[in-house]
Amino acid sequence: MGRKKKERLILENVLIEEVAAEGNAIARVDGKILFVPQAVPGDVADICVTRSKKNYMEGYLVRIVRPSPYRQEPFCMHYGICGGCKWQPLPYRMQLEAKEKQVYDQLVRIGKLDVPEIEPILGSEKQRYYRNKLEFTFSRRRWLLDGENPDDITGEERLGLGFHVGGFFDKVLDIKECCLQPDPSNGIRMFIKKYAIDAGIGFFDLREHTGVLRNLTIRTVSSGETMIILSVTRFDESIAGLLDAVADNFPQVTSIYYFINTKANDSTSDLSAILYKGNEAVFEEMEGLRFKIGPKSFYQTNSEQAYRLYKVAREFAGLTGGETVYDLYTGTGTIAQFVSGSAARVIGIEYVKEAVDDAVENCRINGIRNCEFFAGDMKDILTPEFINRRGRPDVVILDPPRAGVHPDVAKTILASDPERIVYVSCNPASQARDLSILSENYSISRVQPVDMFPQTHHVENVVLLKRK
């Protein structure tokens, strides 16, 4: 069935059977599971094996012998090179089915949890142009495509502004058009690249740490307002000219910031954002609430699906107006404020101080007076002493990072004995681990997946736990 090529095994005429986790598809060959990215169930393909273990293999598509009847033509010109939107060939219905299965597998098949029937996933009305934030990287030496000779690609042709290629910290794919963020995102990015080239502003070299332009972040909101944030190694007249030109050519841009970053890494969390022109923030709206979004603010990147997610969390919380709610990992307090109208009071805890500052400011803007916010490490703030001072929660809402909840935090939640826990997660695997701890005193009552990221394998999941 196979032949060797360059000391790697090529498996011929392999039938792809189903979608698997992490964006892969799977086939079964000689008793082993074979994981293959960018494949669609029903494809018959030749596969190059890159790794072979006792029970499984990994490989990539060499040739599609017979395409699946389900296979769709990718809509993005950068598909297959850019690391995002890997599920473009997969019909959206099949994407949703795969995400539901991912939740089931993590909670039931692997996690062995006692779970009621999982509710149908809430799909996204928009499968393209759904993101409100994208981050791009400048590179003096962009990723070269197949057929491009580095000796022939020199000067400005080698400059790139786009996304990192998976597995390479110093490789950036130059993006001509991205289908993730609505206009004017593509126009702004291409304008900035051309202006910088014409003005001779140096693109950053990720290996040698030379150059001026490092990163570009574009934020858009439903009102049409746009914020751009430029990260540079120094600010001078050339950067001022670039930013002025953006403001003059894009009236949608109402806020312009820059960071001065001379470090070896791209992180700006420890740097001050400098307002160059326009408003200090853009605002997203949800059920009459206005949420201030600054250059460092966290906000769900799919605004429309975030609204549906928050409605699920509020419904699961079952608030009647008299409850004390703890919103843990509150971020900028979006969920806290969203449920505040149905609760007596809400206490939010978040690690990032700037996010807490935004939460407090958003409460002021929205006239909300029954929310309190605290900044610091969750396991250090959420202690029995804190709960004794602030009052026992009737409902706890959790929305932790991908790593999930620290064991000490889980123990404190159990000790606080709330009636209900609403667990919002972007990682069903860590969620299942945490649920196994919480199920000591709680039973899982409802499970609702939500698709925040079409064309990818990522899925959000909301679980309601009720005290036994």
Image (spheres, rainbow, N blue to C red):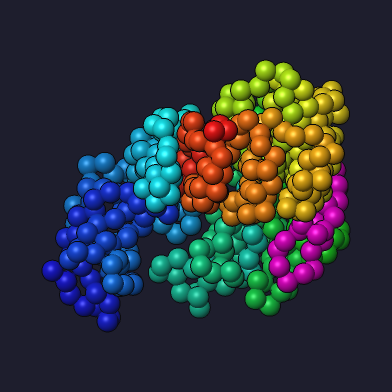
In which quarter of the view is residue 349 placed? top right
Residue 375 to residue 424: above or below: below
Residue 36 to residue 206: above or below: above
Residue 170 to residue 21: above or below: below
The residue sitting at 49% across, 31% down in the picture is: 445
Percent across and percent down for residue 35 are 32, 60
Could you say which is closer to the camera, residue 453 or residue 55?
55
Could you say which is closer to the camera, residue 133 or residue 24?
24
Could you say which is closer to the camera, residue 433 or residue 134?
433
Residue furthest toward the bottom?
A: 7
Q: Which region is colored magenta?
A: 255-277
Horizontal relation, residue 303 to residue 92: left or right? right
The residue sitting at 67% across, 71% down in the picture is: 205
Percent across and percent down for residue 236 are 86, 61
Percent across and percent down for residue 86 are 42, 51
Horizontal relation, residue 392 to residue 49: left or right? right
Which corner quadrant holds the C terminus? Answer: top right
In which quarter of the view is residue 337 placed? top right
Could you say which is closer to the camera, residue 146 or residue 167?
167
In reply to whether residue 259 is colored magenta, the answer given is yes
Horizontal relation, residue 27 to residue 21: left or right? left
Image label count = 0
Q: Is residue 267 visible?
A: yes
Which corner quadrant holds the N terminus? Answer: bottom left
In reply to whether residue 352 is colored magenta, the answer given is no
The residue sitting at 29% across, 66% down in the picture is: 56
The residue sitting at 55% across, 48% down in the picture is: 437
Percent across and percent down for residue 389 are 85, 39
